[in-house]
Amino acid sequence: MNKISNTEAISRRKALALVGLGAVLGLAAATVSVSEAEAQTVGMQRRQGRRTGRQDRRQTRRTDRRT
């Protein structure tokens, strides 16, 4: 039942590295938790619809030229 406990003092460099790692992980968790659905606005949906329409019309023109 003899436990030998070695208490080491943590260096400033190690402490700063741990704080930095915690900050990076905190920021990563915050950015991952934001979903894409929250970012969709009415304007963005309209823009996507116009873009899709342009792509469809462009594809139709290309197909018509080949035939």
Image: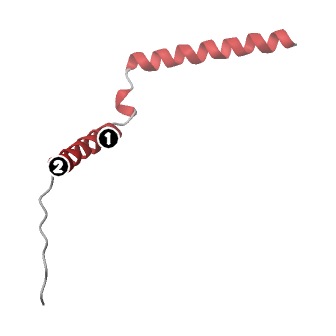
**In x, y percent, where is residue 47?**
48, 15
Image position of 1 with respect to 33: above or below: below
| Front label number (2 vs 1) | 2
Q: Quadrant of the C terminus?
A: top right
Q: Residue at x 26, y 45 (%)?
A: 21
Residue at mark 2 to residue at mark 1: CA–CA distance: 20 Å
**In x, y percent, where is residue 6?**
14, 71
Q: Nearer the viewer, residue 8 or 62?
A: 8
Snapshot quadrant of residue 55: top right
Snapshot quadrant of residue 35: top left
Snapshot quadrant of residue 4: bottom left
Q: Secondary structure at mark 1?
A: helix
Q: Do the CB atoms of the residues marked 2 and 1 lie less than 8 Å apart? A: no
Image position of 61 with respect to 52: above or below: above
For mark 1, what is the residue? 28
Q: How packed is label 1: few (under 14 Cα within 10 Å), some, or many (20 or more)?
A: few
**In x, y percent, where is residue 46?**
46, 16
- Would you say 21 lies left or right of 62 here? left
Q: Residue at x 56, y 15 (%)?
A: 51
* Residue lying farthest to the right in this orientation: 67
Q: Residue at x 32, y 37 (%)?
A: 31
Q: Secondary structure at mark 2?
A: helix
Of labels 2 and 1, earlier in sequence is 2
Q: Which of the labelled discs sits on residue 46, or is there none?
A: none
Q: Residue at x 35, y 40 (%)?
A: 32
Q: Which of the labelled discs sits on residue 15, or is there none?
A: 2
Q: Quadrant of the N terminus?
A: bottom left
Q: Nearer the viewer, residue 48 or 28?
A: 28
- Would you say 43 lies left or right of 66 here? left
Q: Amino acid at mark 1?
A: Ala
Image position of 11 with respect to 62: above or below: below
- Would you say 59 lies left or right of 64 here? left
